[in-house]
C-alpha cells in the first residue's frame, strides 16, 4: 500500500470515534444542532467575520452552517470542533483542520471565537491543543494557518501557539468583493521535539 493511503487509513481510524480534546478551560468536541444559539452570537457579529470570506450570518445561515457540519460528520469527512468553555458549557466558536493532504501529511487550521471571549487566551489555548493533537496523535508533519495581514490579534495567537511566518500568498482571499494577500504561518512536528 502506498504510504499516503496508509496515512489516510490511520488518520480516519484516529478520528473515529470523533475525538474530544481537553484543555484546562476548554473542551473541543463535536458540533451539535443545540450549539446554534451560542454560535449565532459569533456569526452575526461583523467584528468576528471581518477577516472571513463569509458572514455575518443570520439565524438561518448559522443553522445551515451547523447542518453542513453535521452532514460532514455523518460522512466521516468532518474535522471541525466546537470550542466549549467547561465552566458553563457555552460554545465560544469553532476550530478546524481542513485541506488535509495525505501525501504531504499536512493540514490547514482555522478558528474563530465570539467577541465576548476575545483577549482571554481562549484562542491560543484551543489552537495549541488542536496543534498538538494534529501533530502528535494524527501524526501530521505540518500544520499551516493563513491570516489576513491586518488581523493583528490572530497573528499574535499564531505566534503564541508556536507558529512561524512562512510566506505571503498574493491575492489569496476575497473579502466582500476585495481581493487580499494573506500571510501563511506554519508549525511542524519537529518543532514540538
Image (cartoon, rainbow, N blue to C red):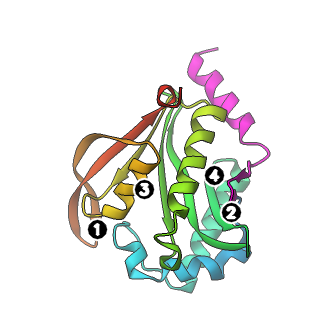
Task: Decide whether residue 71 is among the magenta residues.
Answer: no
Q: Classify mark 4: helix, strand or loop.
A: loop
Residue 176 is situated, as x and y percent measured from the top left of the image, at 28, 73
Give above or below for 168 relative to 69.
Answer: above
**Mark 1–mark 4 contact, CB under 8 Å?**
no
Residue 70 is situated, as x and y percent measured from the top left of the image, at 68, 63
Q: Nearer the viewer, residue 58 or 118?
A: 118
Upstream in the sequence, badge 1 or badge 4?
4
Nearer the observer: mark 3 or 2; the answer is 3
As drawn, is 70 to the left or to the right of 127? Answer: right
Nearer the observer: mark 1 or 3; the answer is 3
Task: Decide whether residue 2 is among the magenta residues.
Answer: yes
Q: Classify mark 1: helix, strand or loop.
A: strand
> Marks 1/4: CA distance?
25 Å
Residue that carries the numbered disc 2 in the rendered image: 70
Q: Nearer the viewer, residue 49 or 165?
A: 165
Residue 111 is situated, as x and y percent measured from the top left of the image, at 49, 59
**Mark 1–mark 3 contact, CB under 8 Å?**
no
Q: Classify mark 3: helix, strand or loop.
A: helix
> Marks 4/2: CA distance?
8 Å
Residue 175 - label? 1
* Residue sitting at the far right: 17
Q: Residues within 10 Å of mark 3 (few under 14, many from 20)?
A: some
**Mark 3–mark 2 contact, CB under 8 Å?**
no
Residue that carries the numbered disc 3 in the rendered image: 157
Quadrant housing residue 151: bottom left
Upstream in the sequence, badge 3 or badge 2?
2
Residue that carries the numbered disc 4 in the rendered image: 78
**Mark 1–mark 2 contact, CB under 8 Å?**
no
The magenta span reads: 1-28
Upstream in the sequence, badge 1 or badge 2?
2
Amino acid at each position: 500500500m502506498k504510504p499516503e493511503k496508509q496515512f489516510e487509513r490511520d488518520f480516519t481510524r484516529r478520528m473515529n470515534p470523533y475525538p474530544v480534546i481537553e484543555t484546562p478551560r476548554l473542551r473541543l468536541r463535536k458540533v451539535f444542532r443545540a450549539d446554534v444559539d451560542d454560535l449565532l452570537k459569533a456569526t452575526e457579529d461583523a467584528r468576528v467575520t471581518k477577516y472571513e470570506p463569509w458572514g455575518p450570518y443570520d439565524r438561518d445561515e448559522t443553522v445551515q452552517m451547523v447542518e453542513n457540519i453535521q452532514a460532514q460528520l455523518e460522512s466521516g469527512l468532518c474535522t471541525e470542533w466546537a470550542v466549549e468553555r467547561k465552566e458553563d458549557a457555552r460554545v465560544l466558536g469553532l476550530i478546524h483542520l481542513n485541506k488535509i493532504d495525505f501525501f504531504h501529511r499536512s493540514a490547514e487550521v482555522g478558528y474563530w471565537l465570539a467577541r465576548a471571549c476575545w483577549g482571554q487566551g481562549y484562542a491560543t489555548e484551543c489552537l495549541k491543543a488542536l496543534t498538538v493533537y494534529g501533530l502528535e496523535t494524527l501524526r501530521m508533519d505540518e500544520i499551516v494557518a493563513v491570516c489576513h495581514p491586518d488581523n493583528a490579534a490572530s497573528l499574535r495567537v499564531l505566534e503564541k501557539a508556536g507558529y512561524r511566518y512562512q510566506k505571503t500568498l498574493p491575492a489569496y482571499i476575497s473579502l466582500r468583493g476585495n481581493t487580499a494577500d494573506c500571510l501563511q504561518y506554519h508549525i511542524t512536528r519537529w518543532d514540538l521535539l
